[in-house]
Image (cartoon, coloured by chain):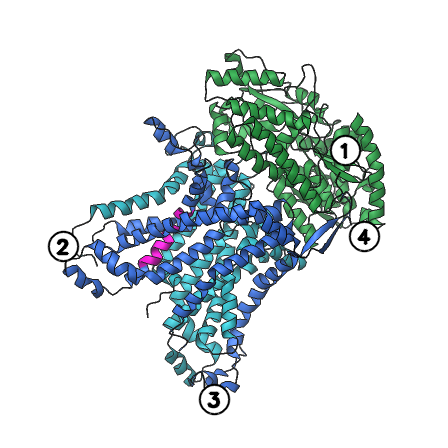
């Protein structure tokens, strides 16, 4: 794309780099702060590195027999399994709505899409009461089940199917005698992969970010995801000091896997789906 | 004394009300709801607690009691735990058997039907382990017993001994002396303060008004009254508002990274806090180890000796527990037996409410105060002087009103605004009680 | 799943026109495909919403002192919870505050996102790979954690900015002072959102066939002119979509002010409508009032976004609903 004869724009490059620096400010800070003991954290100049990154991480690992790593594993489970199931459910629903004509299709789509507008805070209490009714609070399911449905994911899947799976391919498979489920599994799903990676990543981030649902649903801290666990270390009530020297390295460690996932899946990610723009 | 007398009158009316209200339902007799225990079968109990290392404290109990096994679920702190418990009660399932509950939350929890009356399951000797005011907090002045007191939290005054010495300031014994000391410290270095007024800590402010003689709620016959905007509370609000207006006391909240830094670098050189403060100071201001000392809280009238409380909690049995008798047995062990109290003090680092066993359990001063060998003698001295105070069924409403109203006042830095904030709190708390249909006088 | 039949061979495979005569046969397969989504939707969203609506019409009635079992009973409240919500000055000011907040966040966030996207797309700008990655990175940081980090940077006693400014003798304004706190919260939202929107707009820009503006370039148009006259008009639909999604998340602002609240006197427990709902439901234990406020807020969001829904469908599905 870049042509050599174009003179580099100093202003443009400068503005872009200022933006990059702005985005790096808190990240560099958390990197520096993670290496400080709690007294260094509150005395030394905050952008100078400290001396004890590894001992902080060791302390964090030692905290109640490695509870932090269990939180990380839980987060991986909630976000990973939740997003995977959500992607499958969204793919099925999106495919059905994009490629079949059936009574109730428009109404179903409108109702599902209206779900995008409902904030999680509003749902948390009634969801809790419902799960309690079933005796399912304080279990992995209490966080997993509500995370599977993603109106936004269904919307994305529908857009992607209609833009990237030609009707002719489905018809050809059908002429060969393939049944609906088989067509979906062997023909449509493989063609949807780039779109589904996107749905997966969106939902992964959404579950990773959802603080309130696990906070309300879970009483046993062995089931906590990392965000709820870390917030607990900060808000211990008046009688306990906040454990900043554990929380800050914890915050750093908790964003690393997500960054790695992004780097890994970056090239499959079709963010333009979010704007409804699909190249055909 | 007047209050105790009225308290016992109240007890009669309230217990009559309670009897008529529950009409002999299964909840009125906790043990009746228990599942029958087969001999040799192990009872499993769940305990929500936020005290540090509570699982290790409980281990002591589990080892000595082969027929009961208690599992601790660590909670984030008093308020979130109450929220979760009340939601579980509303939902009808999901509550633990046992719950550590702060004293100010007990009326709310009792009102929501969250706690079992364990009077029948406790031995007669339990009451004798606690000071009268502490025991009142778990009976709410009724005939029932809703919890066993776990830790007490009398207010004391912590100060940087080295700083006061350098400026030749005597340790203040009255609030006038405290104000004078605050002025002197701030004059010497405008970045230094003897304390801060925190709009985030309603519990501390309640304790300070308690010392001045306020009781924010009261039971009058079969009605509640709200006395947040009372003369003693106004005195406390105006006093702190005046110091903030003068600028000799800081006005930013406590428990923030800023506040930690200020404690650690010596900008905050005093803290009115409770007996549990050493743990917080050790965690937040590690660099100042050995520089702090404790004294009784300054008094409104010279020569008096009264204090308030900030925090403190009890062990309660929830109404959803299926093993209330075993749960009550554990609560009694934890808070009244020599081993239980010792484990609480030495493993979980709390200041036990028990008055009989705590002296033996607390022979050493906290590590952060190792140069003050009489730390726990001073604490024991003041813990008998806690003023009586009644919490209401909507303490949480009053506390969140405090956050908002006093947040504005602290920013405004006007003593008059502090007084107005108090009446805003009074109005909101009273309106909330009325809106929910409580009898209010 | 295995029992899905091939009803639709006749239903859709033969590509009848929509007004065709085969309407009588209703395919089964699409319904089967929809079952998991609909079941989960009903369970996790629809029932909780209906339950919220029910709770908003209920209240608790207390007998006497309200102590002891049986002293509280749930009763019908009619519309009184709604009356309380709509007449509560705290609620009205939180709505106005959040609208003001949206007027700051959305233009700034999308303006920056558009600027960065255009720069990434410009042939004369360097360091694009690095910048794209770094500006996008905040999207990976949960709001609870980013607010914690910014909170540290805002507090004068621990902030590197205050420290650096003091070295050169400047006193910086405190970001969480009464007049600035809205901007302090907006900054966290902008920080977290600008990269994601930048990528969305950048992808839209990349989809523009380059011959559209190569000619303009040869004619001597500057990059600025190309951006303003050609690129921006083409990606207007993407800009509309990102604004609407920005609007929805703005109205739901919750995590940032909640995490910052304990650090300052200037964020009340009812700063945003969702904080107020949270306070009523969880701190004040009044889920009835919280439910009524929830319903009001949900209806308001719905009305605001209704136009958007129509827009999305007309645009995105125009080609499909032939």
Apparent side of residue B73 relative to residue A52 in the rendered image (left or right): right
- Which one is in front in this view, the residue at disc 1 or the one at disc 3? 3
- Which one is in front in this view, the residue at disc 4 or the one at disc 1? 1
Letter of the green chain: B
Looking at the rendered image, the quarter that the C terminus of chain B falls into is top right
Check disc 1 and report its element: helix, strand or loop: helix
| Residue toward you, B346 or A192 | A192
Magenta-drawn segment: C189-202
Pointers 1 and 3 within a single chain = no
Q: Which residue is mark 1?
A: B136
**CA–CA distance between discs 1 and 3?**
81 Å
Instruction: Using the rendered image of the protein, determine whether residue B308 is visible from the camera's viewpoint.
Output: no
Q: Are marks 2 and 4 in contact (CB under 8 Å)?
A: no
Check disc 2 and report its element: helix, strand or loop: loop
With respect to residue C240, does B178 lie above or below? above
Q: Which residue is mark 4?
A: B36
With respect to residue A119, does B389 lie above or below? above
Q: Position of residue B173 (x, y in %)?
A: 63, 16
Q: Which residue is mark 3?
A: C21
Q: Could you classify mark 1 by the number of other residues whose Cα lies within 10 Å: few (under 14), some (14-19), or many (20 or more)?
A: many
**CA–CA distance between discs 2 and 4?**
89 Å
- Residue C195 forms part of the magenta stretch: yes
| Residue toward you, C57 or C66 | C57
What's the mark number on residue C95?
none
Check disc 3 and report its element: helix, strand or loop: helix
Letter of the blue chain: C
């Amino acid at each position: 794309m870049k042509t050599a004869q174009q003179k580099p724009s100093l202003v443009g490059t400068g503005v872009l780099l200022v933006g990059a620096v702005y985005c790096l400010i808190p990240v560099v800070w958390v990197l520096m702060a993670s290496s400080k003991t709690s007294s260094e954290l509150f005395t030394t100049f905050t952008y100078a590195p400290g001396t004890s990154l590894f001992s902080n991480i060791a302390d964090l690992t030692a905290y109640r027999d490695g509870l932090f790593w269990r939180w990380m594993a839980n987060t991986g489970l909630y976000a990973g399994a939740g997003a995977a199931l959500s992607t499958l459910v969204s793919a099925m629903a999106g495919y059905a709505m994009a490629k079949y004509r059936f009574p109730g299709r428009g109404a179903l789509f409108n109702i599902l899409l209206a779900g995008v507008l409902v904030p999680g805070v509003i749902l948390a209490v009634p969801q809790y009461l419902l799960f309690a009714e079933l005796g399912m609070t304080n279990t992995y399911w209490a966080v997993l089940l509500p995370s599977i449905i993603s109106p936004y994911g269904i919307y994305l899947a529908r857009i992607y199917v209609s833009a990237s799976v030609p009707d002719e391919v489905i018809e050809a498979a059908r002429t060969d005698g393939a049944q609906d489920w088989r067509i979906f599994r062997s023909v449509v799903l493989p063609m949807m992969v780039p779109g589904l990676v996107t749905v997966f990543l969106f939902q992964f981030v959404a579950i990773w970010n959802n603080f309130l649902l696990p906070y309300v649903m879970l009483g046993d801290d062995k089931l906590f995801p990392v965000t709820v666990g870390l917030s607990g270390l900060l808000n211990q009530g008046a009688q306990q000091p906040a454990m900043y020297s554990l929380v800050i390295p914890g915050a750093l460690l908790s964003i690393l896997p997500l960054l790695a996932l992004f780097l890994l899946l970056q090239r499959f990610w079709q963010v333009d789906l979010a704007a409804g723009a699909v190249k055909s | 004394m007047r209050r105790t007398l009225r308290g016992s009158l109240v007890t009669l009316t309230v217990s009559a009300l309670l009897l008529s209200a529950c009409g002999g339902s299964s909840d009125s007799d906790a043990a009746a709801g228990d599942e029958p225990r087969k001999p040799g079968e192990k009872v499993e109990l769940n305990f929500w607690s936020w005290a540090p290392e509570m699982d290790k404290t409980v281990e002591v109990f589990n080892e000595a009691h082969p027929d009961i096994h208690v599992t601790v679920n660590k909670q984030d702190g008093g308020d979130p735990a109450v929220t979760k418990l009340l939601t579980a009660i509303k939902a009808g399932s999901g509550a633990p058997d046992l719950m550590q509950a702060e004293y100010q939350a007990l009326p709310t929890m009792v009102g929501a039907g969250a706690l079992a009356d364990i009077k029948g399951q406790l031995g007669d000797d339990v009451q004798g382990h606690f000071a009268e005011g502490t025991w009142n907090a778990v009976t709410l002045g009724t005939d029932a017993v809703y919890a066993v007191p776990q830790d007490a939290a009398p207010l004391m005054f912590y100060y940087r001994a080295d700083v006061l010495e350098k400026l030749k300031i005597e340790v203040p014994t009255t609030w006038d002396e405290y104000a004078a000391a605050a002025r002197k410290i701030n004059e010497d270095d405008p970045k230094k303060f003897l304390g801060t007024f925190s709009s985030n800590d309603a519990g501390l402010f309640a304790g300070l008004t308690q010392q001045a003689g306020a009781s924010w709620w009261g039971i009058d016959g079969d009605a509640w009254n709200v006395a947040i905007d009372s003369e003693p509370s106004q005195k406390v609000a105006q006093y702190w508002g005046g110091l903030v207006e003068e600028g000799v006391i800081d006005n930013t909240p406590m428990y923030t990274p800023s506040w930690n830094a200020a404690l650690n670098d010596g900008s905050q050189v005093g803290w009115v806090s409770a007996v549990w403060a050493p743990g917080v100071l050790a965690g937040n201001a590690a660099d100042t180890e050995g520089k702090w000392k404790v004294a009784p809280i300054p008094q409104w009238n010279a020569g008096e000796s009264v204090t308030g409380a900030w925090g403190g909690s009890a062990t309660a049995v929830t109404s959803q527990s299926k093993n209330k008798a075993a749960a009550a047995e554990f609560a009694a062990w934890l808070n009244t037996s020599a081993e239980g109290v010792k484990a609480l003090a030495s493993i979980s680092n709390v200041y036990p409410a028990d008055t009989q066993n705590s002296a033996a359990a607390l022979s050493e001063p906290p590590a952060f105060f190792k140069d003050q060998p009489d730390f726990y003698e001073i604490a024991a001295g003041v813990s008998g002087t806690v003023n009586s105070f009644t919490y209401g069924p909507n303490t949480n409403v009053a506390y969140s009103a405090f956050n908002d109203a006093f947040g504005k006042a602290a920013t405004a830095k006007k003593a008059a605004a502090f007084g107005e904030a108090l009446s805003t709190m009074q109005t909101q708390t009273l309106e909330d009680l009325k809106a929910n249909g409580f009898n209010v006088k | 799943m295995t029992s899905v039949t091939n009803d639709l061979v006749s239903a859709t495979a033969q590509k009848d026109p929509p007004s065709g005569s085969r309407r009588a046969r209703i395919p089964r397969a699409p319904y089967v495909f929809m079952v998991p989504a609909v079941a989960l939707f009903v369970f996790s969203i629809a029932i909780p919403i209906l339950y919220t609506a029910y709770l908003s019409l209920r209240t608790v009635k207390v007998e006497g002192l309200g102590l002891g079992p049986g002293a509280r009973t749930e009763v019908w409240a009619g519309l009184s919870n709604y009356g309380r919500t709509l007449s509560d000055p705290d609620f009205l000011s939180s709505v106005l505050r959040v609208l003001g907040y949206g007027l700051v966040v959305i233009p700034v966030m999308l303006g920056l996102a558009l600027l960065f996207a255009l720069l990434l797309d410009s042939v004369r700008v360097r360091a694009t790979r690095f910048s794209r990655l770094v500006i996008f990175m905040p999207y990976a940081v949960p709001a609870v954690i980013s607010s914690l980090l910014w909170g540290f940077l805002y507090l004068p006693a621990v902030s590197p900015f205050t420290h650096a400014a003091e070295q050169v003798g400047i006193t910086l304004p405190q970001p969480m002072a009464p007049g600035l706190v809205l901007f302090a919260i907006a900054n966290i939202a902008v920080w977290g959102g600008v990269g994601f929107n930048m990528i969305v707009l950048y992808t839209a820009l990349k989809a523009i066939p380059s011959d559209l503006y190569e000619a303009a370039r040869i004619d001597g148009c500057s990059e600025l002119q190309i951006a303003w006259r050609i690129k921006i008009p083409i990606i207007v639909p993407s800009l509309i979509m990102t604004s609407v999604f920005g609007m929805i998340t703005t109205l739901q602002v919750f995590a940032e002010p909640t995490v910052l609240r304990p650090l300052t006197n200037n964020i009340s427990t009812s700063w945003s409508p969702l904080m107020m709902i949270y306070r009523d439901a969880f701190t004040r234990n009044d889920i009835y009032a919280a439910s009524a406020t929830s319903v009001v807020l949900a209806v308001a969001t719905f009305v605001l976004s209704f136009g958007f829904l129509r827009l999305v469908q007309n645009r995105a599905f125009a080609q499909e609903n032939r």
